Image (cartoon, rainbow, N blue to C red):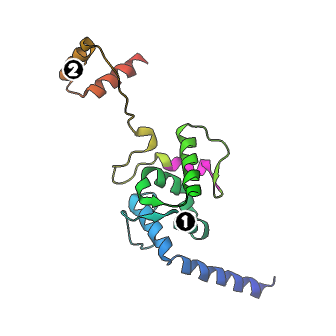
Amino acid sequence: MNKKALIEKINHLAQQDKQRRIDPRYLKIMGFLVAKGFLHTNKKIPLSPNEHINLEDALWAGRLVEPRVLEVLPAAYERFKKHFSGDADTIEKLEQIIDCIQQQDCHEIDFYGMSIEKIKPWFFIHLQDGRSKPMDQRKVSKTYRFKPETVRILKTLKDQTGRSETEVLEDLVAKAK
């Protein structure tokens, strides 16, 4: 390939990238991810935190325009499932990655060429609005059956410390370690 043909090819690819960056599919997914705090951009993109995202469009944007979308997509899906829809295969692949990270059993799974090592940190970042907790800071609901005497002691400790029953139990468990 000579120099002129190479320059022509580079210009064609640059023009193609420019067109893809103004595509509504790209703007929608980037607007959502930027609004939620997963990504930052130096371009002016309309923010759309309440948009419904088609997973096929997100995969298109990640493969052809912005690879960072593929890095954050599993974490965004895990935190905001109601905002996403797509085919069963894509959802199953996302669920496998989520299970792998929750069980800390990160074997060689990749998500459209993105390794699990690049995807994993996005599950543990703090987002701007604070309503969605990172995976490692979420509370787990458990139900226990206590004797009435134990419940009275727990309520007494709660009243003495001015904390919730859950906080009292967490402190007792932490001291027992």
Horizontal and vertical percent position of residue 143: 35, 27
Residue 99 appears at what percent x and percent y? Answer: 55, 42
Secondary structure predominantly adopted by residues drawn in magenta: helix
On the question of residue 66 being in view, the answer is no
Mark with earlier residue (2, 1): 1
- Kindly identify the residue that appears in the image at 20 percent across and 17 percent down: 156
Residue 51 visible from this viewpoint:
yes
Q: Amino acid at mark 1?
A: Glu
Q: Which residue is mark 2?
A: 155
Residue positioned 50% across, 71% down in the render: 26
Left or right: residue 70 versus residue 130 is right
* Span of residues in magenta: 114-122
Q: Is residue 122 above or below residue 103?
A: below
Q: CA distance from mark 2 to mark 1?
A: 52 Å
Instruction: Quarter of the image for the C terminus: give it.
Output: top left
Label placed on residue 56: 1
Q: Quadrant of the N terminus?
A: bottom right
**CA neighbours of label 2 inside 10 A, class few (<14), some (14 to 19), many (20+):** some
Residue 109 position, x and y percent, is: 65, 48
Residue at 47% over, 76% down = 24
Q: Which amino acid lies under the numbered mark 2 shown in the image of this protein?
A: Lys
- Relative to 79, is 170 on the left or the right? left
- Queried whether the magenta region covers residue 21, the answer comes back as no
Q: Is residue 45 above or below residue 177?
A: below
